[in-house]
Image: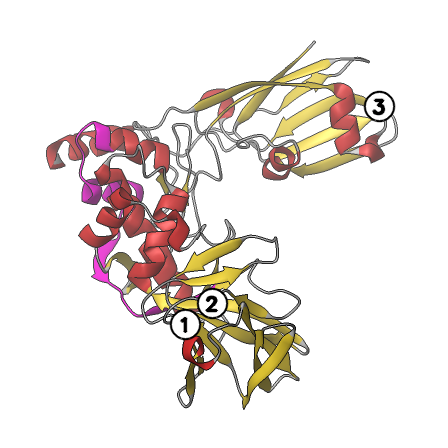
Amino acid sequence: MLGRLAAATAALLVTTAAPATAADDAWDVPHSATITVDGHGHGHGRGLSQEGAANAAGQGLGYRDIVAFYYPGTSWGTAAGPMRVFLTKGDLKNAVLVQPRSGLVAAKVGGGRSWNLAKAKPRASAWRIVPDGDRASVLQYRQRGWHQLQRVTGQLEFSAQGKPVRLRRNDGTVAQYRGAIRSVPSSPGNRIAVNVLPMEAYLRGVVPAEAVASTFPQQALRAQAVAARSYAAAKRAARPDKLYDVDDTEASQVYLGYDREYPTSDQAVQATAREILTYDGAPALTEFTASNGGWTVAGDAPYLPAQPDPYDGDTWGPVTFADTEIEAAWPTIGDLTRIEAGGRDGHGEWGGRVGTVTLTGTAGTATMSGTAFAARLHLQSSWLTMSVR
């Protein structure tokens, strides 16, 4: 496997010279036109490609070879310790509300008193932590209305003696999380829910949320586990004085807790336990993407280069729009007459990813990044081309 990876890498080195500047593309748009868009990749394209990792694993590469390809120049290290995850749907008007279960405990953060809630109020139908100003927390139970059990100075959290905590979320659903769920003051008068749990338990809720655990090869899942653990460790190291290390959305990496755990991804997390990638002695911020379409996109670190990817050739399209749909998305331009795509990165078909898009209409123009254009129209990436008729 090392020989195959080395050969692939050597072939890539021949083709990674600085790209030529790609010419701008422009399409005139007649009245009542149809715009058809085709593209490559899915997502920002930086770092590990999940599509590419699955294909590489299918060709026999191990997870260490896969991450070595996508993060060249990194070294191996370890990470452990807790993660603090902001649960973006976790508070109900500043209250953290959980369902009763065996083992449910409330405790003061930082040590001190704790309460076995099943014993304290066995008939309670729900428990919640609500703020009393910014410096105190109140523990309440529901039994024919809400009643106070305790008030403490400081923060409170729920845990369940190793079992998952059942959290009522602000979208009406119930989700389960390992570790503790803490009510944290975020700004004057406001609270957020923060899940505090061991790194490896956190990864069990991330890997199957980011990769398709039911179909991905084990080595691809292990590569995803290393990338996700490294990313988490890097984010944590950069935010020691913040309220949380990561959130549970794509803004960090998707985390869906206990309910998304899956046997094959659990196996991948366990097989790579504590393993991370480092750069200059610190955890590497190992960004990853669904697919790069055949070229990775350069990131802000030396280990995130732009390079051709022989394991990923994902394409999408055609996606068809009436000109009126684009006019509705940018109403200030009036009747659309011209589309220009410029600033391509020079990597791959059509000159690579689009840097800027300018829409010209009878009432004005709108210029935006290629990424913003793709996002507004729900396209998979900014590596795209068009035809108009």
Q: Which residue in the structure is indicated by mark 3?
A: 335
Q: Which residue in the structure is indicated by mark 2?
A: 100
Q: Nearer the viewer, mark 1 or mark 3?
A: 1
Point 76% across, 35% down: residue: 366
In the rendered structure, which segment of residues is drawn in magenta?
A: 57-85
Helix, strand or loop at mark 2: loop
Q: Nearer the viewer, residue 348 or 137?
A: 137
Height in image: 255 above or below 61?
A: below
**At label 3, which amino acid type do we have?**
Asp
Q: Residue 277 lies in what quarter of the image?
A: bottom left
Q: Which residue in the structure is indicated by mark 1?
A: 104
In 3D space, how far apart are the residues under numbered discs 1 and 3 (Cα atoms)?
Answer: 60 Å
Q: Position of residue 381 (x, y in %)?
A: 53, 32
In 3D space, how far apart are the residues under numbered discs 2 and 3 (Cα atoms)?
Answer: 58 Å
Image-based side of 387 in relation to 206, left or right: right
**At label 1, which amino acid type do we have?**
Leu
Q: Is residue 71 magenta?
A: yes
Q: Residues within 10 Å of mark 2 (few under 14, many from 20)?
A: many
Whichever of labels 1 and 3 marks the residue nearer the N terminus, that label is 1
